[in-house]
Amino acid sequence: MFRLRVDEEILLRSPEKRDAKPIFALIDQSRDYLREWLPWLDSTKRLDDTVAFIRSAEEEFSRKKSLTACILYKGEIAGIISYNYFDWYNRTTSIGYWLGESFQGKGIMTRAVAALTDFAFRELKLNRVEIRAATGNKKSRAIPERLGFQREGCLRQAEWLYDHYVDLVVYGMLAEEWEEKKRERIEKEGRGRKS
């Protein structure tokens, strides 16, 4: 089971069967909000769909193919974050994420993505972390930009969203860049507190 304490408010941990109801309730509460940018909402209509998602996540984790985690904010499930795949030969991964609408604007996802990026480089010894987001999804794109990921390009019509294609911006971070970017963020935060 995966468990990573981000800070005093946020914990990332593997989803368990008992999490199906709160995850499904969060999806249902945020369905219209999430549907704008996530292609799987129409295939998640019943609690059983979330149970199947958790079962699949457990299987993929046991086979070291991916890692999915619940984002707990002050003990409550706020969203999901994952390493969508592991390419162990090339030492790369891609991070995906979503947050319930009522949890937006608290810095939760930026902190969670930073922690998972750090874990990828320090603990898993990966060399590259990638994040892809639709060009129009400003909130999702703001996270890698805030964390210093480099915008590497745009994949045209790379994802089907219900009735249309969207272009995806590709962001990348290399292990050798991460520590420097982390130091820069800490220094910037320190200067912000002084002013």
Image (tube, helix red, strand yellow):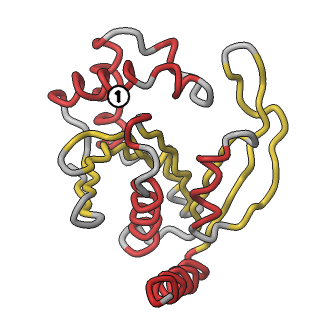
Q: How many marks?
A: 1
Q: Secondary structure at mark 1?
A: helix
- State the image coordinates of residue 113 (x, y, percent, origin top left): 46, 58
- Residue lying at 72% horizontally and 52% vertically, measured from the top left: 170
- Residue lying at 47% horizontally and 59% vertically, measured from the top left: 110
Relative to 113, does residue 154 appear above or below in the rendering?
Answer: above
Q: Amino acid at mark 1?
A: Ser
- State the image coordinates of residue 153 (x, y, percent, origin top left): 81, 55
- State the image coordinates of residue 60 (x, y, percent, origin top left): 37, 38
Relative to 90, does residue 106 appear above or below in the rendering?
Answer: above
Left or right: 89, with 149 as reference point:
left
Left or right: 178, with 194 as reference point:
right
- Residue lying at 49% horizontally and 51% vertically, measured from the top left: 86
Residue that mark 1 sits on: 56
- State the image coordinates of residue 160 (x, y, percent, origin top left): 71, 23
- Residue lying at 74% horizontally and 48% vertically, measured from the top left: 169
Residue nearer the viewer, 168 or 107: 107
In the current view of this chain or complex, which residue is farthest to the right?
156
In the current view of this chain or complex, which residue is farthest to the front?
195
